[in-house]
Each structure stands twice: as structure tokens, then as C-alpha cells.
Amino acid sequence: EPEVTQTPSHQVTQMGQEVILRCVPISNHLYFYWYRQILGQKVEFLVSFYNNEISEKSEIFDDQFSVERPDGSNFTLKIRSTKLEDSAMYFCASSGQGVHTGELFFGEGSRLTVL
Amino acid sequence: GNSVTQMEGPVTLSEEAFLTINCTYTATGYPSLFWYVQYPGEGLQLLLKATKADDKGSNKGFEATYRKETTSFHLEKGSVQVSDSAVYFCALTVRSGGGNKLTFGTGTQLKVEL
């Protein structure tokens, strides 16, 4: 069964360092997303990506964040200069042709700890 | 804007007990409604969905009915098992140009004990 895969599963970094989280969406999907979940809080939308550009982003997704699809398979989230409050679980998701059915397929998440 | 409110957890039940997790929503437009589940150490998985009023989503013994008049989508299961222990998220999406941006509730942790 196709699945979304994310790496790393856990990353610890120092404040101010750059972090890149990687995702391999399901191969025939067209929409890609990043969500995050701060410990004990709700899952929050960060950004959606379609046709090689950002289609929507939240207020959380400021200039410190960027996304890229560098090749035909990977989808990355970069945080340029991490802050303590960026510590969270980051989930990648993808969805396919039937976008209005609403189903997103999520990866297992990348836990980011900023010290 | 869009928002989802669900009951706080943790909810602790004995095996074979009846489960209800309440979920209400506000939305601009006509949303599709979902329940996602997160088992320990895993990602979010779609449990069930409903895309229009009075639809009933069901899967693995869980059910939820889209109630437009009460803006609710409560999750129910007649007899829970220890393996149902997980965090359950109610979510909605409204059709937009941004694909399927989901708005989640805070999640409800369910613990099922023998």
C-alpha cells in the first residue's frame, strides 16, 4: 500500500540552526502539505503546495519557512533559523486527483526539538 | 473562519464499553467532515468521513453522522477494544483552491482498559 514517508523521525538542533525536513509523498498525488503539532496542542496547517508553487499558507508560515519540491519525489520543509517555539511534530501529507473527497494521507511525522 | 471543537480527554473506558466523542464545528461554506486517528508512535490515519448532511461515515465499528442542523459530527462505537486506544481528531475541510486544507480539533485521547 502506498504511503507517505518522512525523514528524519526525530531531529535535535540548536536554536538558530537551519533544519530541513524531508517527505516523499505518494507518487501520483498532486497536492502536498505540511502540518505541525506542538506537544499537547492541535494539529495546525502550515502550507499547501500544488503545481510547483505554494497554493495556500497560514500565518505560522513566515519568512523563516520555505518548501521545495527539488525533484519528482521529494517535498521538503526548511526552517532557516530555528526558534525554541518551533519544537513540534511536523507532518507531511499528500492528496490525489479526487481532492474534493478531502482525504489526506499523512506520514508518521518528524519530531523537531530545538534546544 | 473555520473551527472544530471536540471534547477534551483523556477518555478512559473499559473494554466493550460504549464510546462517544463529541465534535462540533463552524465553517464558512459547506464542509466535508472527518475523523482521523493517531495510534501511538504512528502518523494520522483517516478513520471515516462524510461529505454532505445526513451522511454517515463508518469504519472499523466506528460511526459518525453529519448533522448540519446541530453542526456536529460525533464519533461513536458500540464496543471498544484495547486496540482502539489512540488519539482521535475531528477535522473539516471546505473546498478551496488550496487543495484540502484540514482544520483539526485538539484531539481526544482514548484509553481502553481490560
Image (cartoon, coloured by chain):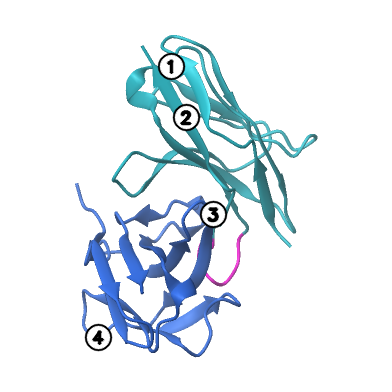
User: Which label's residue is closer to the chain start, 2 or 1?
Assistant: 1
Please tell me which residue lies in front, B1 or B66: B1
Chain letter behind tag 1: B
Q: Residues within 10 Å of mark 2 (few under 14, many from 20)?
A: many
Quadrant showing the C terminus of chain B: top left
Q: Which residue is mark 4?
A: A70
- Tell me the CA gap for discs 1 and 3: 25 Å
Q: Amino acid at mark 3?
A: Gln
Q: Nearer the viewer, mark 1 or mark 4?
A: 1
Compute the Cα span from label 1 to label 4.
44 Å
- The amino acid on which the numbered mark 2 sits, given as a three-letter code, is Leu
What residue is rendered at 68% in x and 37% in y? B53
Helix, strand or loop under label 3: loop
Is label 4 or label 3 in front? 3
Tag 2 subunit:
B
**Which residue type carries mark 1?**
Val
SS for callout 4? loop
Task: Residue A41: give its label.
Answer: 3
Mark 1, residue position: B80
The amino acid beneath tag 4 is: Pro
Give how far apart the Cα atoms at labels 2 and 3 are. 16 Å
Please give left or right for residue B70 compared with residue A23 in the image.
right
Labels 2 & 1 near each other (Cβ < 8 A): yes
Most extreme residue toward the front, as rendered? A115
What residue span does the magenta drawing correspond to?
A: B95-101
Q: Earlier in the sequence, mark 4 or mark 3?
A: 3
Q: Colour of chain A?
A: blue
Reading the image, the residue beneath label 2 is: B110
Give residue B99's position: percent from left, percent from top. 50, 66
According to the rendering, which colour does chain B have?
cyan
The residue that appears at 49% across and 51% down in the rendered structure is A101
Do the residues indicated by labels 4 and 2 lie within the same chain of the protein?
no
